[in-house]
Image (cartoon, rainbow, N blue to C red):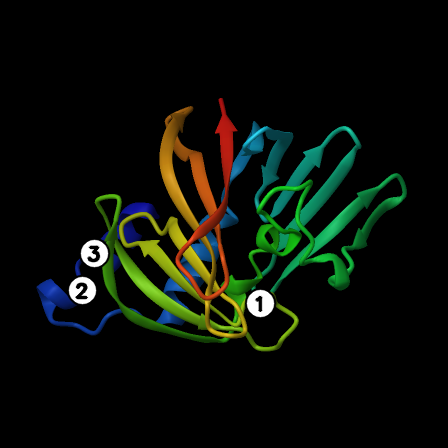
């Protein structure tokens, strides 16, 4: 499937003179790839002296983040038309409160909304160009939030043409100022498959390009 995507995405406008894929087609492919993972890995969020370990498990469209000290488990379900973040309790699961989505996770620069991938389902999306991110040739997309429920008014997204992987995301606040940037720093091969190794998350001081905090999301073998 990834080989087919590489041919489709990589050999378009410049070689055959055909139109670039639509933003919808690209996002459909990203969501499809994201729901095909089967993983059970350890990870951490790290910001200065703060280290937050977690366990990451995925069975197709179901992704679970398990934290300790105190215990907290979140389940993300990636559907065809939307994603849903649930809190896992002893009685089962309950929908994560929308009022808490903008809260930071244990003092890091990552919010619960960031884990929910809701921007992948925003209907107002368009391809705005092509750029390289760490030598990878990417489609660059702009996505606009459908409502003010999100902390972001719009998002710029860089998608690897060959693999469909998300390489970079920039979130802009409701004053159109850059608020946060996510970027893949490195990847690793586990059981003959490529996975994220380290992602850098930068928070920006409003109205400037000054980085006020850096958090690293790291996945271990």
Q: Secondary structure at mark 3?
A: helix
Extreme residue toward the right, this view? 91
Q: Are marks 2 and 3 in contact (CB under 8 Å)?
A: yes
Q: Residue at x 46, y 73 (%)?
A: 176
Residue 69 position (above or below residue 123):
above
Q: CA distance from mark 2 to mark 3?
A: 6 Å
Indicate the position of residue 184 as horizontal and vertical percent values.
39, 42
Of mark 3 and mark 1, the one earlier in the sequence is 3
Of mark 2 and mark 1, the one earlier in the sequence is 2
Indicate the position of residue 35 as horizontal and vertical percent values.
52, 49
Indicate the position of residue 63 as horizontal and vertical percent values.
62, 43
Q: Secondary structure at mark 2?
A: loop
The numbered disc on residue 121 is: none
Q: Residue at x 57, y 77 (%)?
A: 146
Task: Decide if residue 126 is in sight here.
Answer: yes
The numbered disc on residue 10 is: 3
Task: Decide if residue 8 is in sight here.
Answer: no
Q: Which residue is mark 1?
A: 81
Q: Which residue is mark 2?
A: 12
């Amino acid at each position: 499937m990834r080989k087919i995507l590489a041919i489709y995405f990589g050999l378009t406008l410049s070689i055959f003179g055909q139109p670039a894929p639509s933003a919808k087609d690209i996002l459909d492919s990203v969501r499809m790839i994201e729901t095909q993972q089967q993983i059970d890995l350890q990870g951490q969020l790290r910001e200065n002296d703060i280290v937050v370990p977690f366990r990451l498990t995925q069975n197709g469209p179901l992704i679970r983040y398990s934290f300790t000290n105190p215990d907290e488990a979140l389940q993300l379900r990636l559907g065809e038309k939307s994603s849903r973040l649930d809190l896992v309790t002893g009685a089962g699961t309950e929908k994560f409160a929308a009022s808490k989505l903008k809260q930071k996770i244990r003092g890091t620069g990552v919010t619960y909304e960031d884990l929910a991938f809701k921007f992948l389902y925003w209907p107002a999306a368009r391809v705005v160009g092509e750029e390289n991110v760490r030598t990878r040739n990417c489609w660059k997309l702009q996505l606009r939030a459908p409502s003010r429920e999100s902390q972001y008014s719009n998002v710029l997204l860089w998608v690897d043409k060959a693999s469909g992987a998300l390489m970079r995301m920039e979130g802009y606040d409701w004053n159109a100022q850059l608020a946060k940037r996510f970027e893949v720093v490195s990847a690793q091969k586990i059981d003959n498959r490529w996975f994220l190794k380290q992602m850098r998350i930068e928070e920006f001081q409003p109205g400037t390009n000054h980085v006020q905090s850096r958090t690293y999301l790291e996945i271990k073998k």
